[in-house]
Each structure stands twice: as structure tokens, then as C-alpha cells.
Image (cartoon, rainbow, N blue to C red):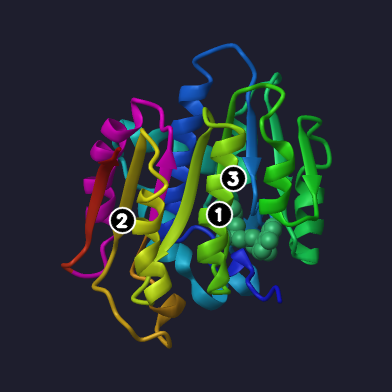
Amino acid sequence: MLSYRHAFHAGSHADVLKHSALLLMLDYLKQKDKPFWYIDTHAGAGRYRLQDAEAQKTREFETGIARLWSRSDLPESLQVYCDSVRAQNGGGDLRFYPGSPLFAAHSLRAQDRLRLFELHPQDYTILGHVFAKDRRAMLAREDGLAGLKALLPPLSRRALVLIDPPYEQPSEYRQVVEALKDALRRFPGGTYALWYPLLEQTDAKRLPQKLAGLGCESTLRVELRVRAPTARPELKNGGMYGSGLFVINPPWTLAAQLREMLPYLVDVLKEDNSADWRVDVVGN
Ligand code: SAM
């Protein structure tokens, strides 16, 4: 069952965290000339029009990207992210919000490649249009976690993998841990970023601990909480009160960049006084 559409959530606080961190990691990989792959197991539609009915229904972008849009005091670590959104809007008003594949495409060089998986028929069609002229990109309407297995290790021997499932089914919490375990066996040197929601549900609360149990040598747990936890799923976005990224083999520069960025994001994106952040090094 595929009912999740990212168009309802485009540009939210969770997207701000995920996409700004993504661009910092891509910038680091570009420091070497050697090509790399960007693999997006759950790509979404690639671009979202914020005037469309879906985005207008929830207006999540208003408490996300819109709060950063006209700030003139952005820390350096957020500059590339905001510049990238501006580029997608031709320097004009905020009308479009790029999805993770488009942020990556904007950042990648001619020698790099994108491998994008998306299952939803409508979002896959839109993604196809967005990438119609980009010869670096290969798209597949397949299960992203199975697709990842088939791609690793990548020919380039350098890759950043974003795993960003909708977590509609409780089984997805287990599947992402299994997928990472398998991916690390096939390609231990890759950089893996897994996004997860902060929710009061048991599966969601247990995920960070399960990920820490993977026993990787170098891992970051990054979280941005914008409001107090609530166990009321009828509230906005199922009661999601923030989100996190679990990054395996992060660039060594990432923790410091995020520690500069997150206090600023808390300040700008907070919805109540319990807003907070963490960047923890999780090691063996
Ligand atoms: N990564 C996107 C971004 O940051 O712009 C957002 C992705 S959204 C959170 C999750 C997407 O995964 C949805 O578009 C959904 O249709 C898709 N999806 C769900 N299950 C999938 C699967 N097993 N394989 C690939 N895509 C899947």
C-alpha cells in the first residue's frame, strides 16, 4: 500500500535537516576528483510546487524552509542549502521545493552518477520528467532497499546512500536496519544516511538503539526536535515532533558543521520551548 506522498511534507523542518545535511556530505565527497554515486532508495517526486493542493493542505513548508527563506544571518553550513533552493526558484519567490534527488543533482559534477528508486506510480512519473534530460541519473520503479542490495559495491567504490522511507508500515523500522546490515557487508566504506521520525511510538523510539547496535566504528546520531513529544497520532504529521539522521561513515567535518547549524535551526524552527538538538558520535 503506497499512500504516502511527500508533496504533503515538502520543505518541512524534517526536510530542512535532511537536505542541509545531505548537501554538506556531498560537498565533502566532491573534494576529491574521483567520481562517486549518489543512491537514493526512496527518491520521491524530485520537485514540489508549494502552491499545489497537497502542500497547501498541510502548509508544512511554512514552519520549515519558509522560516529560513528571508534570513540574512544564515550560518555558513546552511548557505549551500538555501542557495540551492533559491536556484530552483530562479532567484524569485519561494514557489518550488526540490526533493533529495534534485538537491543532489544540483550539487553533483559531470563525472558523478545518481541512482534513484521510487515506487509510487505518480511520483515516479514526475521524477521521470524532472530527470528527463539528466544523463547522469538512472531511475527505477523498484523497491529501493532491494535495489540497493543489487548496486553494492558501486563501480565507483565511492558512494553516498540516502535511505528515506515513509515509515508507513511498522515493518519498515526493521527493514532499514536489515538493509544497512547487508549494505555494510557488501560495501563497508560507503557513507549511509538514514532519516527517521521522532515519534512516541515504540518502533520509532527503539530505532536509534537498534542502529547503534550495528556496531559501526564511525557513526553520527543527529536530531532536531521542534516541539514537545506527544503520543497523539491525530496531531499534525502523526505527532512527529522532530526528526533524525543516522549517518554511518560520515565525513569527518560533518559533526562540527552540524553543531554550528543545529542551534540556529532550533532557534528559527522551534514551535515551543522544548525544541532541542543533538549530534552524538556513536562508536564501538
Ligand atoms: N527522499 C525524498 C526527499 O527527501 O525529497 C522523500 C522521500 S519520501 C519520505 C518516501 C518515498 O518513498 C515516497 O515517495 C514513497 O512513494 C517511496 N517509497 C515507499 N516505499 C518504497 C520502496 N519500498 N522503495 C522505493 N520507494 C518507496
The residue located at (24%, 50%) in the rendering is 278
Badge number at residue 182: 3
- Residue 92 in the image: state x and y as whole percent: 55, 45
- Residue 72 in the image: state x and y as whole percent: 31, 40
Q: Is the CB of mark 2 within 8 Å of ligand 1?
A: no
- Can you identify the residue that label 1 sits on? 178
Answer whether labels 1 and 2 touch (C-beta < 8 Å).
no
The amino acid beneath tag 3 is: Asp
| Residue 241 lies in the magenta-colored region | no
Q: Is the CB of mark 3 within 8 Å of ligand 1?
A: no
The residue located at (53%, 13%) in the rendering is 32
The region drawn magenta spans 244-272
Q: Earlier in the sequence, mark 3 or mark 2?
A: 3
Query: In which quadrant will I find the N terminus?
Result: bottom right
Query: In which quadrant will I find the C terminus?
Result: top left
Dot in front, 3 or 2: 3
The amino acid beneath tag 1 is: Glu
For label 3, the SS is: helix
| Crowding near the residue tagged with mark 3, few <14, some 14–19, many ≥20 C-alpha atoms within 10 Å | some
- Residue 247 in the image: state x and y as whole percent: 42, 42
273 left or right of 169 in image: left
| Residue 262 lies in the magenta-colored region | yes
Image: 75 above or below 263: above
Q: Which is more toward the observer, 84 or 44?
A: 44
Q: Is the CB of mark 1 within 8 Å of ligand 1?
A: no
Image: 116 above or below 251: below
For label 1, the SS is: helix
Q: CA distance from mark 1 to mark 2?
A: 25 Å
